[in-house]
Image: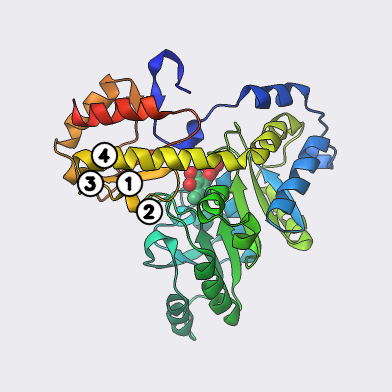
């Protein structure tokens, strides 16, 4: 479905708008004061979310950033380090929150597609001797945003989790796009979450809800998370109006397959013209990373043609990688228009 006025938006899956069914559910939602635990719609959503990922409890939060930051806060002490890959969202895109709010640093490893290997954990932990900060938490990201929505296969997580446990680490999964990963890997979400202590996921990305994420884990940890959420200003009141849309979103998660097929179509069309710019085989979910230096025109010109066609895109990140994202509010005709604009045919 195209945006109004023939516009299209490939910046992110966060630009998706609530569906008519979500809007209806929002209008009809039963609500109460969620800080008192009185919002039946939030309570139902939290139960459903916990069940989907095989955890005891869940806490509804406004954003994926808050889910990650609560996980960091609950699993660490000030002065600790968090082990993650160097491209991780929690380290790069959350405005330094982990340092500012939890007083932790990061110990990063170079792990393409977020696939951290056991020996990388081993090396970090071996180095953490007498003088270094204590490394207390391992964070996975699945799908992995910076690498263009790549998936971390369950066996890779299993091996890393086993190594992390050997060193007494807690484990958090940033599953902002967990269901994209599960759909692409053809596994139940639980298969990706069974070895972690906490997992966060977002309703507001490809699932299409307007607002909201959730953090899931065991009941004691989630009780503490609820305490910390209030500390961060995330205690919301009649938020069932939002949770109602998230419940619809959660039911529709299989639809993400369509976004993945569209991303592959986009990658293939770009590769038809510029085979060096993108490798369609690396497109596993709903993102396409394009190497701008391999496009036949200077990127400035590409961008002005794309914008002139009424299509919104983000500028490339460092390293000249341009991320394009598919979602429920773009379709094949939008992709065709985008490709035509990139190559100005
Ligand atoms: C992997 C990942 N984690 C966390 C977030 C944060 O989500 P939010 O924008 O809801 O704070 C994002 C947002 O794009 C993300 O891609």
Residue shown at the point (27%, 31%) measured from the top left: 339
Q: Quadrant of the C terminus?
A: top left
Label 2, label 3: how far apart the Cα atoms are? 14 Å
Q: Quick check: is the Cβ at mark 2 less than 8 Å away from ligand 1?
A: no
Task: Name the residue tied to disc 1.
Answer: 289
**Residue in the foreground of this view, choosing between 94 and 100:** 94
Label 4, label 1: how far apart the Cα atoms are? 11 Å
Label 1, label 2: how far apart the Cα atoms are? 7 Å
Q: Secondary structure at mark 1?
A: strand
Asked if the residue under mark 4 is in contact with the one under mark 2, i.e. CB atoms within 8 Å, the reply is no
Residue shown at the point (66%, 47%) measured from the top left: 214
Say whether disc 1 or disc 3 marks the residue closer to the N-terminus.
Answer: 3
The circle drawn on residue 71 is: none
Q: Quadrant of residue 302?
A: top left
For residue 135, say whether it is visible. Answer: no
Say whether disc 4 or disc 1 marks the residue closer to the N-terminus.
Answer: 4
For residue 88, say whether it is visible. Answer: yes
Say whether disc 1 or disc 2 marks the residue closer to the N-terminus.
Answer: 2
Label 2 crowd bin: few (<14), some (14–19), many (20+), radius 10 Å: many
Asked if the residue under mark 3 is in contact with the one under mark 1, i.e. CB atoms within 8 Å, the reply is no
**Residue in the foreground of this view, choosing between 163 and 286:** 286
Task: Name the residue tied to disc 3.
Answer: 277
Q: Position of residue 5 (x, y in %)?
A: 41, 13
Q: Is residue 145 left or right of residue 229?
A: left
Task: Name the residue tied to disc 2.
Answer: 147
Q: Is residue 212 left or right of residue 313?
A: right
Task: Name the residue tied to disc 4.
Answer: 270
Q: Quadrant of residue 235?
A: top right
């Amino acid at each position: 479905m195209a945006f109004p006025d023939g516009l299209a938006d490939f910046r992110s899956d966060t630009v998706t708008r609530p569906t008519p069914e979500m809007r209806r559910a929002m209008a009809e939602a039963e609500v109460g004061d969620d800080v008192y635990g009185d919002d039946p719609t939030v309570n139902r959503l939290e139960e459903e979310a916990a069940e989907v990922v095989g955890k005891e409890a869940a806490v509804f939060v406004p954003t994926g950033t808050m889910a990650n930051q609560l996980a960091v806060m609950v699993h660490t002490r000030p002065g600790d380090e968090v082990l993650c890959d160097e491209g991780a969202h929690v380290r790069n895109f959350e405005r330094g929150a982990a340092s500012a709010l939890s007083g932790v640093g990061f110990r990063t490893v170079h792990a393409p597609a977020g696939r951290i290997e056991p020996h990388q954990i081993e090396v970090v932990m071996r180095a953490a001797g007498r003088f270094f900060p204590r490394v207390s938490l391992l964070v996975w990201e699945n799908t992995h945003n910076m690498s263009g929505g790549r998936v971390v296969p369950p066996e890779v997580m299993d091996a890393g989790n086993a190594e992390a446990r050997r060193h007494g680490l807690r484990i958090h999964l940033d599953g902002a796009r967990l269901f994209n990963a599960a759909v692409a890997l053809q596994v139940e979400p639980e298969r990706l979450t069974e070895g972690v202590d906490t997992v966060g996921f977002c309703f507001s990305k490809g699932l299409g809800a307007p607002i909201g994420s959730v953090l899931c884990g065991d009941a004691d940890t989630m009780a503490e998370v609820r305490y910390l959420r209030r500390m961060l200003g995330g205690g919301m009141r009649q938020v069932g109006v939002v949770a109602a849309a998230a419940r619809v979103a959660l039911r529709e998660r299989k639809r993400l397959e369509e976004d993945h097929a569209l991303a592959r179509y986009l990658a293939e069309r770009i590769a038809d013209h510029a085979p060096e710019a993108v490798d369609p085989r690396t497109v596993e979910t709903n993102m396409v990373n394009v190497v701008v230096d391999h496009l036949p025109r200077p990127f400035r010109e590409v961008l002005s043609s794309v914008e002139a066609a009424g299509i919104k895109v983000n500028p490339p990140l460092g390293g000249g990688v341009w991320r394009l994202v598919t979602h429920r509010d773009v379709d094949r005709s939008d992709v065709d228009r985008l490709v035509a604009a990139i190559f100005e045919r």
